[in-house]
Image (cartoon, rainbow, N blue to C red):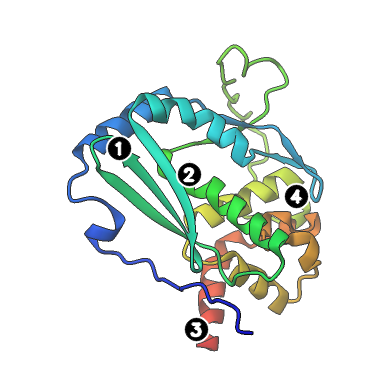
Amino acid sequence: MNQPQLKTIEPMSTHEVLQSGEINEIGKALRGVQASLTPVVKRSQNPYFKSKYATLENVWEAVKEPLSSNGLAVTQVPCGQYLVTTIIHSSGQFIRGFYPLGELADDPQKLASKITYARRYSLSGMVGIVFQDEDDDGNYASNRIATKPEPLANSKVIPLERPASDYKASEAAEAVEKWMIANPSYKAEQVLDFLAYKGYKFDEDDVMGDPLRLPENVLKEVASKINKLTPAIKKWLASKA
């Protein structure tokens, strides 16, 4: 018996698809939301590379009251190979974004992990959430963020891209996370397939389609070459076309 097939859609870049005809009211509302947001603290522990991250629940807890009080609602619906996130204003105006889910997994657990990951980053990006590490000194509770001291004149300046051995696990994860946010057109599966092609070793069942769940040593190696990742993947995909 044939299984029902999900319809595959492509995100369109037309004005009508990505937003309503007018966005003045929703723009004002989002400005009100962002004025009341505070950084979301990374509190959950990732056991794969001993770093912390913010969960979907953390993000939603931070935005639900500001959204509601400004007349905004959110829907996040998987459609084909994309998660479609729509922010709707009480006026009827809306903005919409598409986040690639890649190939749909046969394993429901893997698919759920992909959707949760996509929901977290789509919602964060569209609303304007920023993240910060947990503050053990109590600065978070008092709404104060410590100012980073100026480096001493003779201190060693480490460039953004540096040897893998110089990275802490949390720094490597953050570098990869920032790259993924800045390059949403590359699917998580494409990144993982590229890394496997380049010879990096990892267990697909452990990673579950999420590059941030890569083993610590792989994350550090990727972070050490992060500035070369975009052109390398682009060239690799072109060679397969």
| Mark 1: amino acid | His
Q: Secondary structure at mark 1?
A: strand
Mark number displayed over residue 161: none
Is the residue 128 above or below the residue 148 in the image? below
**Residue 65 appears at what percent x and percent y?**
46, 25
Mark 4, residue position: 166
Mark found first going from the N terminus, 1 or 4: 1
Mark number displayed over residue 123: 2
Q: Which tag is nearer the camera, tag 3 or tag 4?
A: 3
Is disc 3 surrounded by few (<14), some (14 to 19) or many (20+) residues within 10 Å?
few
Q: Secondary structure at mark 3?
A: helix
**Residue located 22% across and 35% down the image:** 25
The residue closer to the viewer here, 156 or 111, is 111
Q: Which tag is nearer the camera, tag 2 or tag 3?
A: 2
**Residue 12 appears at what percent x and percent y?**
32, 67
Q: Are marks 4 and 2 in contact (CB under 8 Å)?
A: no
**Residue 216 appears at what percent x and percent y?**
79, 54
**Cα–Cα span, label 1 and label 4:** 46 Å
Mark found first going from the N terminus, 3 or 4: 4
Q: Is residue 154 left or right of residue 127?
A: right
| Mark 4: amino acid | Asp
